Amino acid sequence: MNKTWKRTGLALGLSAALVLAACGTDDDTANNDTNGDDGESSTAVAESLDYTITGIDAGAGVVAAAQDALDVYDLEGYEVQMSSSAAMTSALGTAIDNEEPIVVTGWNPHWKFAEYDLKYLEDPEGVFGAAEDIHTITRLGLADEMPEAVEVLGNFFWTEDDMGVIMNDINNGADPEAAAQEWFDNNQDKVAEWTDGVNHVDGDAISLAFVAWDSEIASTHLMELVLESVGYNVEISVLENSFMWEAVASGEADAMVAAWLPATHGSQWDLYQDQVDDLGPNLEGAKIGLVVPTYMDIDSIEDLNN
Ligand code: PBE
């Protein structure tokens, strides 16, 4: 399943890139015609961006929100280019190396804010929602069947700075396993808060679903170690967003620590809220939006029409 998803993602990413490349040569004529405006100056920002918002995987809430933003802000001619988190951060890095314009679907916690000078574009229409929390969600019945795991999962609560340590290590080349292990070793006080008084189990199997977003790679690898420390045999599987939710709702996966609520995964929540248990936030003050390098001379999503 993992491999299939990766390949599909790659194929989608490639075909989007090819389509864009093919459009590249006659951009100016095409866009001026469609927009019906009277000169390059009024669409300088849009043209400098090739009418492209660099997105991530198609299932991500931030991509859906970016597509809504095209309508709400009347961003005529723009496309949200879809690929993956890794492709997005790679495009962002290349653009910044060359001081070129770029706008990406962004979120925090994320290491890109530590690595680069970036800003969120203002969103006066509130398309990307306000502050978000990341929730821990389990399948129904897990609390009865694996109360020890549910105790640990329910206790799990950390901060953007905590998660940032693991994400930055991974961005600097560490394996997710090693980065999570280092945080685990260096933060035994926090691990103890989540596990103290929890009875140990004897190798019971538990599965966590997640999506290959940088933030969730960090949190899920850490939770794997924490559950292992109380005796669980933990399997983590990477899925596309809608399949992550479906897996937990159907009981195929036991839990996930990757539910962005209320807005980012609001449509999944509406669909599955009666088929899952919400153990509450594991991180508060997350956010999604459109993100640009600070050297770009625009401040609001509205300015993308300039
Ligand atoms: N993200 C990271 C996800 C949630 C976590 C913002 C890319 C999304 O947009 O669905």
Image (spheres, rainbow, N blue to C red):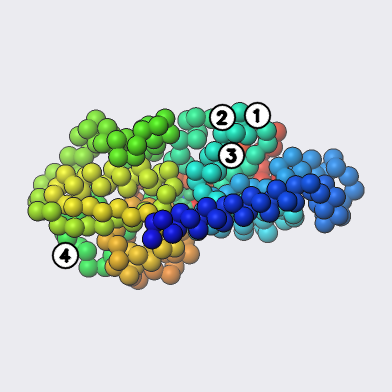
* Residue 145 disc label: 4
> In terms of sequence position, does the residue under pointer 4 or pointer 1 come before the other?
1
Q: CA distance from mark 2 to mark 4?
A: 47 Å
* Residue 131 disc label: none
> In terms of sequence position, does the residue under pointer 2 or pointer 3 come before the other?
3
Q: Residue 282 at x, y = what percent? A: 32, 48
Residue picked out by circle 2:
117
The quadrant the C terminus occupies is top right
Q: Nearer the viewer, residue 25 or 179?
A: 25
Q: Secondary structure at mark 4?
A: helix
Residue picked out by circle 3:
91
Q: Nearer the viewer, mark 4 or mark 1?
A: 1
Q: Secondary structure at mark 2?
A: loop
Tags 4 and 1 touching, CB below 8 Å: no
Which quarter of the picture shows residue 262? bottom left
Q: CA distance from mark 1 to mark 3?
A: 11 Å
> In terms of sequence position, does the residue under pointer 1 or pointer 3 come before the other?
3
> In terms of sequence position, does the residue under pointer 1 or pointer 2 come before the other?
1
Tags 2 and 4 touching, CB below 8 Å: no
Q: Amino acid at mark 4?
A: Glu
Q: Secondary structure at mark 1?
A: loop
> In terms of sequence position, does the residue under pointer 2 or pointer 4 come before the other?
2
Which quarter of the picture shows residue 217? top left
Q: CA distance from mark 4 to mark 1?
A: 54 Å
For this view, does 189 lie left or right of residue 282?
left
Q: Amino acid at mark 3?
A: Ala
Q: Residue at x 51, y 55 (%)?
A: 9
The quadrant the N terminus occupies is bottom left
Q: Amino acid at mark 2?
A: Asp
Tags 3 and 4 touching, CB below 8 Å: no
Residue picked out by circle 1:
98
Q: Nearer the viewer, mark 2 or mark 3?
A: 3
